[in-house]
Amino acid sequence: MNYLAPLLLVFALFQEIIVGEEFGYDGNLGPLHWGERYQECAGKHQSPININVLHVKQVTLPDLELIGFDDSIDNVHVTNNGHTVLIEVKNEPHPRVRGGPLDGDYIFSQMHFHWGDNDTIGSEDKINHRSFPMELHMVFFKEDYRTPSEAVKHSDGLTVLAFFYELDRHEHPAYDDITSALVNVTEPHTSVVMDHPFSFLNILPYDLKRYFTYRGSLTTPPCSEVVIWLDFEQPIRLEREQIEAFRQIRSAHGKITHNFRPIQPIGDRVVFYNVDSNYYVYNELDETEWTTTHSPSKKKKHGNSAVTTLPTTLHSLSLIFVLFIVL
């Protein structure tokens, strides 16, 4: 029976190759053909979508709770799975998220990236038809369903926190460990453990209050329509060379020049925009304060900068005008 061993090994390798080629982004394996093999990829509530900010419905949802995002996590694995760069956490407990549009706790499963071959394309969702050079998807499964494989059987099984990237003149230091790991996983089906502990919060933007949310699907086969999407408005800023490091990742056919699915019809879905309720409070005029003091110089932090209320600005302009007349 020993003569069967080489044949079984060849068969196993053949199966692995076939599984790895179940979908792609070009030709007969590209997105236009996914529905032929995966029926749900032709569904009516697919992702990604274009978000038209004029057609969103503004809401104020409960605060998101990001649990374990600021922890220093060891044993973080970075993998090239032939389609993207995958980051997984092996140690327990995994980070989790609750609040916002979510009913219950969602546990971190993995995060991965989508990019294009230049700085004008790469993201999957778009804002006002604008594409970003890269997009991060942090995938969480609902705790009630115990495992990701069970969660995808339920309409609220997954949530994805999505973040867009923009170019910056300066490097983002929190991404050094990721880009250093990429050098060791350029070839498909390779993996490496990060050298240093990893913190989720360090790689995310400052403003996590304003985001778009809608019901959609996985953006790769089997395209299960089980995802609550949260697309955060504030982008993450990376230096061009940091984004270029992702473009060196290879599949079985060469460099992965693009791994994003085209925009899908929004259909009858509504996209909600969660506004920071304090945003409007910061910019409201306090008429009583204005008439009694004439100089309300209150400042509130909004994102990374201070926002000055309108009366203060008008008062400053008035003083400048008076000085101009006097002089």
Image (tube, rainbow, N blue to C red):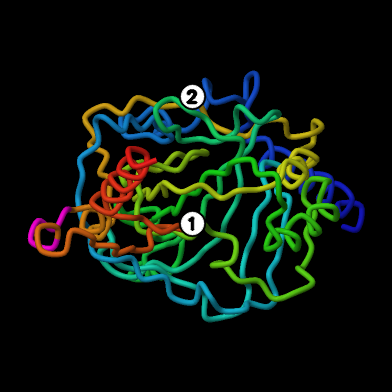
> What separation in Å lies between label 2 and label 1 (alpha carbons)?
26 Å
In which quadrant will I find the C terminus?
top left
Q: Main secondary structure of the magenta part?
A: helix
Range of the magenta residues?
285-289
Q: Quadrant of residue 271?
A: top left
- Give the residue number, with chain letter if any, for mark 2: 36
Q: What percent of the width, then of the height, locates residue 325? A: 32, 38
Q: What percent of the width, then of the height, locates residue 108? A: 49, 66
- Give the residue number, with chain letter if any, for mark 1: 139
Q: Is residue 15 visible?
A: no
Q: Is residue 101 left or right of residue 261?
A: left
Seen as rendered, the residue at the extreme front is 327
Q: What percent of the width, then of the height, locates residue 121? A: 60, 28
Q: What amino acid type is highlighted by mark number 2?
A: Glu
Residue located at (66% from left, 48% from top) = 238
As drawn, 138 above or below 106: above
Residue 286 is inside the magenta segment: yes
Q: What percent of the width, then of the height, locates residue 231? A: 41, 47
Q: What amino acid type is highlighted by mark number 1?
A: Val
Residue located at (30% from left, 43% from top) = 322
Q: Could you tell me which secondary element the residue under label 1 belongs to?
A: strand
As drawn, 247 above or below 91: above
Q: Is residue 31 visible?
A: yes
In the image, 265 versus 312, the foreground residue is 312
How many C-alpha atoms fall within 10 Å of the one at disc 2: few (<14), some, or many (≥20)? few
Pick whichever of labels 2 and 1 is earlier in the sequence.
2
As drawn, 14 above or below 209: above
Q: Is residue 50 left or right of residue 111?
A: left
In the image, 18 versus 320, the foreground residue is 320
